[in-house]
Amino acid sequence: MPESPPSPVDVTPDAPRHGDTSIRPRLWHRRHLGALLAHVGLSVLFTWPLVLNFLPGAGTTTPGFMRVDRNQNLWNLWWTREALLAGRNPFVTDMIWYPEPQSLYYHTLNVFNGIAAIPLLSVLSLPTTYNVIVLLSFVLTGWGAFLLVHYVCGNCWAALAGSVVFAYSAYHIATMRGLLQLISLEWVPFFVLFLLKAVFDAVEPGRRGALRWGLTRALPAGFFLLLVTLVDWYYTLYSLMIAGLLGLYLLWRAARPSRDESDQRWATRLAPVVRLGAVIAVYLVLAAPLLIPTLRELRTERYMVPDPDAALRHSADLAAYFMPPRGHLLWGQAFSWRDRWPFGGDTYEVYFTYTALVLAGVGLLAVRRPRSDDRSWVPGRRFWAASGLVFFLLSLGPVLQVNGQQVRWLLSPSVPLVMPYRLLENLPVFNISRSPDRFDMPVTLCLALLVGYGVNALSDRLARGNQSVRPARGVSVAAVALIVVELMPFPYPQSTADVPRWYSQLAAAPGDYSILELPPQGDYWHGAYRMYFQTAHGKPTFGGYISREYYHPFLDSTPGFQQLQRGSEEADMFADGPDEWFSALERYRVRYVVLQKRREPERDDPRAEPDVAQSREHIAQVLGPDAEPVYEDEQLAAYAVASPERRVPFLSVGQGWQPREVGPNGAFRWMGSRATIEVEAPSLAEAYLEFRAAGLGSPRRLQVYHGEVLVFDRMIGGLQTFRTDGPLGLPEGTSTLTFVSPEGTVSPARLGLGDDPRQLSFALLDMRLDSVQK
C-alpha cells in the first residue's frame, strides 16, 4: 500500500458520477467561481429583503425578530473593535456591569466577526455592518460547503446541490432571528475540507514534502478550526467531534487492512492518524491563548453550567425534522402550534427537507461500485451517514420527545426514553452545553455530502445507456428549486435598530464618566437594549446581558445605588444617608441617571412599557425633591447627578452575607462563619465602626479585622450596639473589614427556631462609620 492514498476527488470509491470528472481537485477553478456567484444570488434570495437594507435611506434595519440577541450581537461587534483598537483583551470588559470586570470567555462574543467589522465600521453604520456580515456568512457558508462536497464527490453540480442543503438549511435560516454567532458557520466546511486534504492528499517524500504538507494542509486546517473557535464554542465542539469520528474510522481501518493492500506495515497504516493528530496539535498551538484562560475559568467557576433542565428544554423534537419551518411563506402557519410545546423556546428549526432526504437516500442505497485498491482508506457515504446518525441522535437531547410529548418506555410508562445525549451531558466541557438542537448543524453537513452522492448516483442512473446525456445539471437545478419551495422563508422578518436621540448626543459630551439606567433591570434580557445604546454613547453602564449570566451584586450592595434601585425606605444593614449616597455615586463616576420610559424602544405596545413612577420617586428621594431632568422626550428622561457637598467614607456589602431581611428593628443581614464589608474612603481618614449585632443561640464570640489588624473581639448574645475599641485608620481607596465567628455556625432548625437549615452566626444592622474630626 502506498504511504499516502491519492485524493478522494480523483476516484470516488462508492459514488458514480457524470459531469466534470476530468477536473482536477483545485480549490480555485472557473466553475468554482461560478458556484461562488451562484451562492451570492441564493444568499440574497434566502435572506430577502436583507439586501434592501443597503440602499440609501433604508434606515437602521436588520434581519430577525429576536431583538434581544440581535442587540447583544451588535454590542459584540462594537466592543471587539473598541477593545482591539485600544490594545485591550476583548474577552474582559468593564463597560457593562461596571465597575466589576466581566469575563466574556463564555459569552457568545464571536470575536472573529468583531475583527471583520473593524474596517467596515470605519465606513458603515453598526446595523449595516451587521447586515454585511450576515450576508457574507451565508455566501461563504455556501461556497465552503460547495468546495467540500466537490472535493468528496468530484462533481460541481452535485456540489452545488449539497452546498444548498447546508448553507440554506432550516437551522441556518432560523439563526437569522438574531444569533450572529450561529449564523457564522462558514468556517466549519472549510475546516472539514482541509482536514480531509491533510489526511488523504498525497504527501511528497522527504523533509521538503513534510514541510509543504504542514504549510499547505495542516496549517490551513488548524487555522480554519481556530476561526471556528473565534466564532462559537458549540461549532468548535462539533468540528472536533467530526475529527474524532474520522480518527476512529482511521483506527478501525488500520486495525483491519484489506488483503489487496500492498503495504501491511503498522507505520504506514497509522500515517493518516498521525496526520490528523498533527492538525489538531497545530490548532491547539494556535488557539492556546484563548483555550488556556477559558479552561482555567471552567475549573474555578460554575456560572457557565446551565440549569439541570436546560438541555431538555433546548432539544430537537423528532417530529420537527419532518415539519416545514414555522416561517414558511405558504404553510408555515399550519405548524405554529409548535409554539405551545413545552420546549424549543428559542424557536429552533431542524427541518431536513424531503428533497434532501430523497437524494441522500438515493446516494446511500445506490448500488456500490467496487472500491479501487488505492482508495480503500478514504471515508465514503457510509461514514458520513454514520456520523450524521450520531449527531442526529445527540440533537434529540437527553430524552426522546415527539410532537411535544416525552416518549416513555413501553414496559415502564413512568420512565422517559433516554437518549445518547444523557451519557455526555455530565462530562467535562459537555456539561456546559445547553442546546442539543444545535447538533443539527453537523447533521446537515453530513446530509449535504450524502446529497452530493445522491445527485451523482441519480444522474448516473439517468444517463445509463446514453453516455452523451449529462443529467447532473438538471438534477441539481431541480433539487435546488424544490429546496427553495420547501423552505421559502422570504420575506424574512426585519427589525429596526434605532437608538434614542439623547444617547447619540451624549457621545459628543466630553468626559470620562458612567451612567446609571432605571428602572432596575428586571431581567438580564432587558440589558441587551442598554448594551446596544452603549454603542452610541460609549459610557460604562451598571447593567448588561452576557450569554452565561450570573448574579452581579454591585447595585444591591452599594449605597446610593441601592436606594435608586429600591428606594431609601428599604434600607440595607447600613445607617447611611445622602452624604454616603452622593460619595458613592461620585466614586463610580455617575454623571447621569437615565430613566427609560420604554422597555422595548422599537415597540409602541403599552403592555411592554415599564412602570416608571416608582423609579421617579426613588430619584427624588436620592437626588432631591427638586431634581428635574436635564433632558426629556417620549423615550427617556436624564437627570444630572450633583457632586457631594461632603465627601465621606462609605460601606458596601462584601462576601459571605445572606440576603437582606427586614425585622422589627429594621433591615439586617445574617453572616456565616466569615463575611466582609468593603470600605471606600476618598482620602486618608480615621473613623470608628459602629453596628448593632445579635448572636444566634447562646452568646458567641465575634471578631472584626481591618485588613490584618484585629479591631474588635467580644462575646455577643442579644441585640446590642457595639463600637470598635479604637478608630480605624482608613487608607485612601478600598480596604476590607472581615467579620469572623471563631465558634462556627448553627442552623435555626437545629435550635428549634423553625425549619431554616442555613448555617448562621450573627445578624448585623445599623452599621456606620463615625468619622474622627481632626
Image: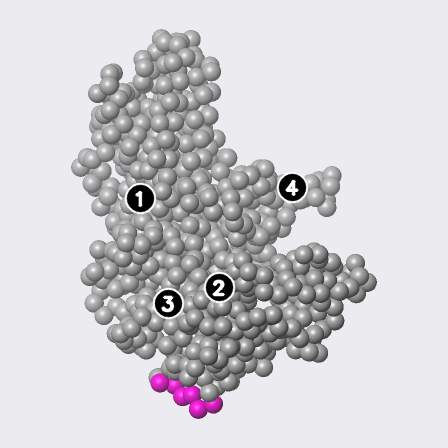
SS category of the residue bearing label 2: strand
Residues under numbered marks 3 and 4 in contact, where contact means CB atoms less than 8 Å apart = no
The residue labelled by disc 1 is 142
**Magenta-drawn segment:** 625-630
Comparing labels 1 and 3, the label whose residue is closer to the camera: 3
Q: Which comes sooner in the sequence, label 3 or label 2? A: 3
Residue beneath disc 3: 540
Amino acid residing under circle 1: Gly
Tell me the residue that label 2 is attached to: 735
Asked whether residue 384 appears in the rendered view, the answer is no
Q: Residue furthest left?
A: 30
Q: Label 1, label 4: how many angstroms apart (C-alpha)?
A: 37 Å
Give the alpha-carbon distance from disc 4 to disc 2, as whole Å. 56 Å
Q: Which residue is nearer to you in this view: 441 or 382?
A: 441
Q: Nearer the viewer, mark 3 or mark 2?
A: 2
Q: Amino acid type of disc 2?
A: Ser
Magenta stretch: helix, strand or loop mostly: loop
Give neighbour class at mark 2: few <14, some 14-19, many 20+ (Cα, 10 Å).
Answer: some
